[in-house]
Image: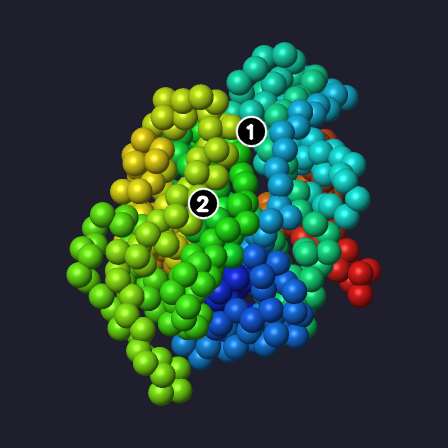
Amino acid sequence: MEHENIAVGLDIGTTKIVAMIGKKNEYGKVEILGIGKSKSLGVHRGVVNNITQTIQSIQQAVTDAEISSGLKIGDVVVGIAGQHIRSLQHSDYITRSDSDEVIDENDIDRLCNQVHKLVMLPGEEIIHVLPQDFKVDGQAEIKEPIGMYGGRLEANFHVVVGQVASIKNIGRCVKSAGLELSGITLEPLASANAVLSQEEKEAGVALIDIGGGTTDLAIFKDGIIRHTAVIPFGGNIITEDIKEGCSIIEKQAELLKVKFGSAWPGENRDNEIVSIPGLRGREPKEITLKNLSKIIHARVVEIVEQVYLEIKNYGHEDPKKKLIAGIVLTGGGAQLNHLKQLVEYITGMDTRIGYPNEHLAGDSDAETTSPLYATAVGLVMNSIASKEKARNNEIEISEEENISEAASDASQDTSDTAIQVQEKPKEKVKFFDKWAEKFKEFLDNAE
């Protein structure tokens, strides 16, 4: 990497692969320096099913991003999705040896690492361990236990689990494309970072990210992630329905969906017709927009109802009361006409389209702020955050070393005055860094 404060997100989707390069500007906003996009070949419903084609698609997207930014990409944070992802709730605790010392980050790391050792089903691996709330010596509903006294530290966790083979295949594609994998993030979490405000997360909100192969859901309440799910349907299945229903080729079906598609059949009059050229001199086909929107409507209703069922499972009978901020739609599928109105009609919840401009610099171009790039923007933000953490750690460690050196010099100079310095452990490695190291080892061993 030419500049250490530059971060790269790689969104490996079913329809497209996006490489996005960004950095934090002086106002704390994310500035996009370059973007590369390629057609995703070899990925089906968020899972790699052709290694060679996926590597080529990644290389093309990365090359485009390097050309548009004039920078060289070294390491990337990758998004993971797919129907193999599942989530569960888990509670765990640790007993501290010295309750007279305040709880620090090492204790939370120890608790998270303990959860990472949970025995999963064969072929599964934990991707994320996300603390929700803590208990200290039985005192409940603590959001931030650092700095408190206590002997027993307890927490409820949201644990995200995925298949080892799928994670390894993504790692292999990234390494074979000549890149370093610095971290893996669940795609709905990345999208949530990009399009949701802190107020929405506090009030309670459901983020629905409609991609090509999957629809991802992330529910937040009181500023904490409460539920995640991946539904194995997305925009591609709507295109497939149009192709079958209108007896046309896939390319034409996709164009029809993007240009004339609507999720609400009542919007189109019966006399609105679109003509599609026939193959090899055959007669052109005429399709009414009303029929087209009926086909789209049927499939979109199915997807929205499945997502709403997941939301109801979290919010029990009436999610409207629990999730005050309602629903935010993002991803390429969110650009379908009248989708917002249909979602409001089915769920009865306030709905808006989520654009990833919440944290982007003001001069970002319109393409970057499209819902299509929400996941990529979120991955860049995650990469920036993890690099900042790593830098702060290094500063902390060097400061501690300087203090201990100064103290040893002072003790040599003044033999009368005994200066005691309590040395902290030199390596205060954060959980994310440990996880990245473990993951790299895991990939190396797999090869």
**For the residue labelled by badge 1, is the local secondary structure a helix, a strand or a loop?**
strand
**Which residue occupies the foreground of this view, 123 or 438?**
123
Going by the numbered disc 2, the residue's amino acid type is: Ile
Q: Whole-percent x and y of residue 202?
A: 39, 30
**Viewed as shown, does residue 361 lie left or right of 174?**
left
**Which residue occupies the foreground of this view, 154 or 264?**
264
**Viewed as shown, does residue 238 lie left or right of 357?**
right
Q: Residues within 10 Å of mark 2 (few under 14, many from 20)?
A: many
Looking at the image, which residue sits at the far bottom? 281
Q: Picture quarter containing residue 36?
A: bottom left
Asked if residue 162 shows in the view, the reply is yes
Q: Picture quarter containing residue 303?
A: top left
Q: Which mark is residue 132?
A: 1
**For the residue labelled by badge 2, is the local secondary structure a helix, a strand or a loop?**
helix
241 is higher (above) or lower (below) than 195:
below
Q: Whole-percent x and y of residue 56?
A: 59, 76
Quarter occupied by the C terminus: bottom right
Quarter occupied by the N terminus: bottom right
Distance of label 2 from label 1 (alpha carbons): 28 Å
Q: Whole-percent x and y of residue 194?
A: 41, 49
Going by the numbered disc 1, the residue's amino acid type is: Gln
Q: How many marks?
A: 2
393 is higher (above) or lower (below) than 282:
above
Disc 2 target residue: 303
Asked if residue 358 shows in the view, the reply is no
Q: Which mark is residue 251?
A: none
Q: Residues within 10 Å of mark 1 (few under 14, many from 20)?
A: many
Residue sitting at x 39%, y 57%: 332
Looking at the image, which residue sits at the far top? 138
Residue sitting at x 26%, y 73%: 275
